[in-house]
Image: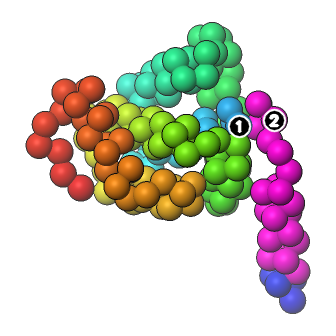
Amino acid sequence: MFGRLKKLVSATLIDQAAATPHSHDEKLLASAVLLVEAASRDGVISDDEEATITALMERHFGLSGDEASALIVDARQTQSEANELVRFTRAVKSAFGPEERIHIIEMLWEVAYADGELHHYEAALLRKVGGLIYVSDRDRGAARKRVLARLGITGATT
């Protein structure tokens, strides 16, 4: 009984969150949480992955180094407390246009490859997030190819 009530309340809150406009800070946090999730999927967030997330937040969102670092601390805390990603993917889906969502996928690929290899859990996350934020497999694959070319990685599989 309690489990059904909890699911109902949770579903209602998620629906309300999807219907409300997201603030700039919420969009940044949702994006950062997804990047942190990608970095942590293989069990550890490497220094290279954290540096990549920081650089991406600075470059894409125009944050200072201190702002990006503070956001990542918040994102790590939020990600460790979250039991699902739906609220973050819904925030990204509703807050960003199609081209920006493709760029979020590109950022996720960059984080996934930051440590030099793509773990199968990271690849699975990219497929899942791509679907949840309405980025087609074709666009997700094209984003991956752009990242591989930019990073100079050849012969990557998965």
Pointers 1 and 2 in contact (C-beta within 8 Å):
yes
How far across and down, in percent of the image, does residue 109 sit?
A: 38, 40
Query: For mark 1, what is the residue?
Result: 27
How far across and down, in percent of the image, does residue 138 sit?
A: 34, 55
Question: Which quadrant, please, contains the N terminus?
Answer: bottom right
Q: Is residue 82 left or right of residue 139?
A: right
> Of the numbered discs in the image, which one, if any, rests on residue 15?
none
- Secondary structure type for disc 1: helix
How far across and down, in percent of the image, does residue 147 sit?
A: 31, 34
* Residue that lies at the very extreme toward the left in this rendered image: 155
* Rendered residue at 81%/64% (across/down): 15
* Residue that lies at the very extreme toward the front in this rendered image: 98
> Of the numbered discs in the image, which one, if any, rests on residue 23?
2
Residue 145 seen in the figure: yes
The foreground one among 138 and 35 is 138
Look at label 1 and name its amino acid.
Answer: Lys
- Secondary structure type for disc 2: loop
Q: Is residue 145 left or right of residue 45?
A: left
Q: Is residue 100 magenta?
A: no
* Rendered residue at 76%/37% (across/down): 26
How far across and down, in percent of the image, does residue 32 sit?
A: 60, 35
Stretch of the chain drawn in magenta: 5-26
* Rendered residue at 44%/25% (across/down): 52
- Magenta stretch, main secondary structure, is helix
As displayed, is residue 29 above or below residue 17? above
Question: Which quadrant, please, contains the C terminus?
Answer: bottom left
